[in-house]
Image (cartoon, grey):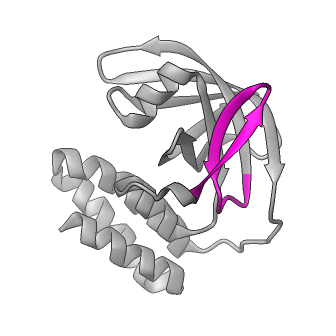
Amino acid sequence: MGLLKGGINEVIATTGTNAAPMGIHLRSGKASMVLFCGSHTAVNIERDLWVVANFVHDPVLYVKTAFEDLPGDAFVEETVEGKTMIRLAAADAWAAFFVSVEHKATEALTVSLTLKKEIIRNVAVHPVNRGFNSIIDATVHATRYAHNHDPELKKIIDYHIGIVKKCGGKPEIAALDLLLSHLE
């Protein structure tokens, strides 16, 4: 499938001028997403039936899009098979998908994705950085923690905070500072 690899791929999904970190599942060559019903992302995807996966190596942007709205100049319009879609201006690469709703329950919406276009804008090697990976994990858990204040989630977040402090560089530490401000 090109940019996506087997397993869950963490991307920043754009649906209109909404951007949010999301996991795209790739199993047996089929891409799908599970979204929380009522979220801006789920509402937009169900209405418009498209999503753009933005591949970004900026940990601060992951935290920002998890908790904040981005300004209008953070987005760029792209026409894909006659549809106007929106991607992040800062994306290193992006993939545009048409969406089919597979299942809708009270809390979750499951959709399948059909790839329509992929573009690599910047080619760079990003060595494995445990600090980067942990800021992504901490952010995922923090979005859930913000809703339910589960002490077990807080323990997981604290574990990842320790890894970011030990292994992260300046971008990861800046992302951690932003994340901590949202957890207060």
Q: Quadrant of the C terminus?
A: bottom left
Q: Quadrant of residue 32?
A: top right
Up-down relation of residue 81 to residue 68 (above or below):
above
Q: Residue at x 80, y 26 (%)?
A: 81
Q: Main secondary structure of the magenta part?
A: strand
Indicate yes or no whether the magenta region holds residue 90: yes
Instruction: Give the number of callouts.
Output: 0
Q: Position of residue 45 (x, y in %)?
A: 51, 27
| Residue at 26% from the left image edge and 72% from the top image edge | 181
Indicate the quadrant containing the N terminus: top left, top right, bottom left or bottom right.
Answer: top right
Asked if residue 120 shows in the view, the reply is yes
User: Position of 175 compared to 116: left or right?
Assistant: left
Using residue 101 as the reference point, say whether residue 128 is left or right of it.
Answer: right
Q: Is residue 51 left or right of residue 106?
A: right
Foreground of the two, 146 or 98: 98
Q: Residue at x 45, y 57 (%)?
A: 70
Q: Nearer the viewer, residue 39 or 150?
A: 39
Asked if residue 184 lies in the magenta stretch, the reply is no
Q: Nearer the viewer, residue 163 or 37?
A: 37
Q: Is residue 128 above or below residue 156?
A: below
| Magenta-drawn segment | 74-93
Residue 80 at x, y = what percent?
A: 77, 32
Residue drawn at (52%, 68%) of the image? 59
In percent of width and height, residue 78 lies at 72, 41
115 to the left or right of 14: right
* 76 up-or-down from 85: above or below: below
Residue 28 seen by the camera: no
Please state the horizontal and vertical placement of residue 19, each as a whole percent of the image. Answer: 49, 48
145 over 108 or under it: above or below: below
The image quarter in which residue 36 lies: top left
